[in-house]
Image (cartoon, grey):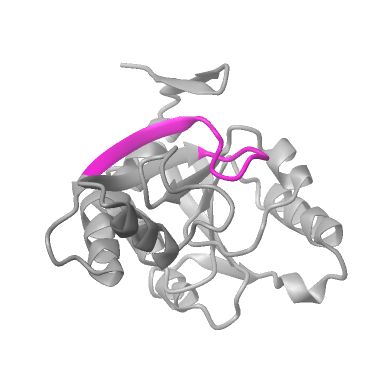
Amino acid sequence: MKNIVVLVSGGGTNLQALINAQNRGDIKNGRITCVVSSNPNAYALTRAADNGIDSVVIKRKDYDTLSDYDDALTKLLKSLNADLVVLAGFMTILGSKVIKAFENKIINIHPSLIPSFCGEGFYGLRVHEAALKKGVKLTGATAHFVNEVCDGGPIIIQKAVAVENGDTPEILQKRVMEQAEWKILPQAVALFCDDKITVKDNKTEILD
């Protein structure tokens, strides 16, 4: 049974999707053992408490440098015996130490079909604003491993979502969350916990 630690900063809708999947029995070989928040007021902490999941707050501004924060977060995750780290709306930059310590063990969900609308500066509504400005007919979400390139790690699962007439960034964001993010993030976590993902040359292969 793998220990899953979920990193959050806000409302925690993707955390809730993971909790729901766990409660349904969809994540058979893993369990969420702790939620770590960069924001002491994040509603995600309430979601954790409501489901009997331990939580820890670690704020970036409590540390003088990113390196110090990187050290502290790495130490914390190791102390929690994390087998998998999931970024579920974590709005603080990860440093190189934690990324190296958990190579191919950190999963992020991004609200586009990478490599479109991704990388530095593409987060939240900005992603959907860019998609609408470009006029794409399909967007979606990507679950991927995290490396030191922003949104550049090996892709695990992608799911497409249609862009519809009259969409606003807010409407599109909600559809992408409901139809893609909340589905493929738990699927990626389950695959990891089942040892069904291999990584080679920055690409994944999903085992049957």
125 within the magenta span? no
Q: Quadrant of residue 40?
A: bottom right
Identify the residue at the far left of this view.
Answer: 165
Residue 105 image offset from top left, x and y in percent:
58, 37
Residue at position x 54%, y 43% in the image = 151
Q: Quadrant of the C terminus?
A: top left
Q: Is residue 64 left or right of residue 98?
A: right
Residue at position x 48%, y 60% in the image = 123
Identify the residue at the far front of this view.
Answer: 134
Residue at position x 64%, y 63% in the image = 92
156 within the magenta span? yes
- Pick the residue in front: 105 or 96: 96
Residue at position x 40%, y 29% in the image = 194
Residue 82 image offset from top left, x and y in percent:
61, 45
Q: Is residue 165 above or below residue 109?
A: below
Residue 101 image offset from top left, x and y in percent:
73, 38
Q: Is residue 166 above or below residue 183?
A: below
- Pick the residue in front: 65 or 130: 130
| Residue 123 in view in this figure | yes
Q: Quadrant of residue 55?
A: bottom right
Q: Is residue 73 left or right of residue 4?
A: right
Q: Quadrant of residue 187?
A: top left
Residue 153 image offset from top left, x and y in percent:
55, 34
- Which region shows up in magenta? 145-160
| Residue 1 in view in this figure | no
| Total numbered circles | 0
